Structure formats: C-alpha cells, structure tokens
Amino acid sequence: MSGPVYETLYQFSRSLTDDHIDEDQSEVETGNNRTVQCQAVHARGKLDGRAVVVSYHSHYFLAARGYHYIPNVLEVFVTGNHLKFEGECRARSFADKLARWFGGGGRRGPDPIFDVCRIDAPRDADLADFARPDFTARLAALSSHVHCLKVQVQAGTGINALFHGTHYRSSLPRLQAIVHDVAALAAA
C-alpha cells in the first residue's frame, strides 16, 4: 500500500514535533456509480508551535457547491486562532470575471485581492482580516498559486488549503515550501 506519497509525508512528519503519520485505503464511489480505491495518508504534528495536518488523498470530493470529484489532492491545515474571517478564496476564473459584470463572482471589498481572487463568504462575514496588508498579500499569493484549488479560512481555527497533489507527492522540498506558505498565512 505504501509508496512515494507515504515516504514523502513520512520524511515531512519527521520535521514536526509530536509527529504522527497514518495511512488508509478505502473504496470511494464516484458520481457515475464507479468505485475506485482511495489512498489517504495523514501526517500531523506541530510546526513552530502551530498544529499542522497534511493529508494526501488519491481521490477526493470537493463539495462546497455540489458534488465534485478530483484525483490527487494535497490538503494542508494550519491552526491560526486569531482569524476572524470565515470563507473561501481561490484564483478567479474567466466565468468569475464575467459574473462580476452582472453583480456575482464573490464578495467585493476595497482591497485589490477582491479583484484578483474570488472570495466567497456569508454576507455578514467579518472582513477585518482584509484590512491587514500582510494577510491579504499572503492570501492572494497562496490562492493564486498554480496548483492551489482553494483556501478556506476558518474563524478562530485556521487555514485549510487544497492543492493538486501530483506536484508534491514525491518532492519533500516542494511539500515543505507549500506547508510553510500556509503556516505563514495562518500566522499573518
């Protein structure tokens, strides 16, 4: 069952304090009633005093707006208990830019990040975090990363970022770099 993904996450876990790693294999049913094997590897511990969970799923469901199934997802969660914003951020697609002409395409705000990235949040979401230039610059850079699917900001909890995992599954330096970028955002 183990392979390059497990080895990379195992090496990464050794750089954490209070490290733990586990692996699971299960069947996942796709939308067309097809069943596939899913390998899930989780490494967790603390990085510079912050709790970190890094997961690799060979098949993954994204369900923010309905059912979406994609292979090879790397998920990085880093705690950040000072955050007030609750929502999602991702690079704008052409459809998002077009939707803005008709009043859609995510939240609006004074910071340039609202033009570069699609930010989805409840209407009454606290936008105080976007008044901090360091936070918005790091969020824009991370969510516009070529391999980033989306960044979820969880108020009082932390940052959860999802990436196309193929790029990271056998490269420890790339994995460490992206985890440090997420950690820097959680600390901003």
Image (cartoon, rainbow, N blue to C red):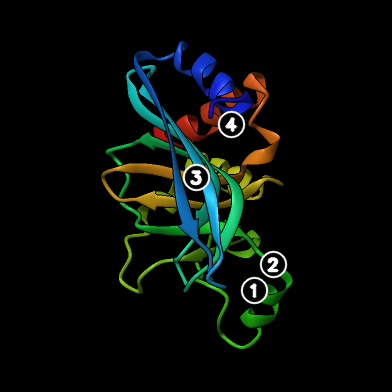
- The CA span between labels 2 and 4 is 22 Å
* Nearer-the-camera pick, 76 or 105: 76
State if disc 4 and disc 3 touch (CB < 8 Å): yes
Q: Nearer the viewer, mark 1 or mark 3?
A: 3
- Judge from the rendering whether residue 173 lies leftward or rightward of residue 50; answer left or right: right
Quadrant of res 112: bottom right
Give the residue type that dot 4 points to. Ile
Which x, y percent locates residue 31? Answer: 53, 71
Label 1 crowd bin: few (<14), some (14–19), many (20+), radius 10 Å: some
Q: Amino acid at mark 2?
A: Ser
Q: Quadrant of the C terminus?
A: top left
In the drawing, what numbered circle is on residue 178? 4
Query: In the rendered image, which residue does mark 3 sit on?
Result: 161
Image quadrant of residue 147?
top right
Whole-number angstrom distance, CA of label 3 to CA of label 4: 10 Å
**Residue 8 percent across, percent down from the top left:** 58, 21
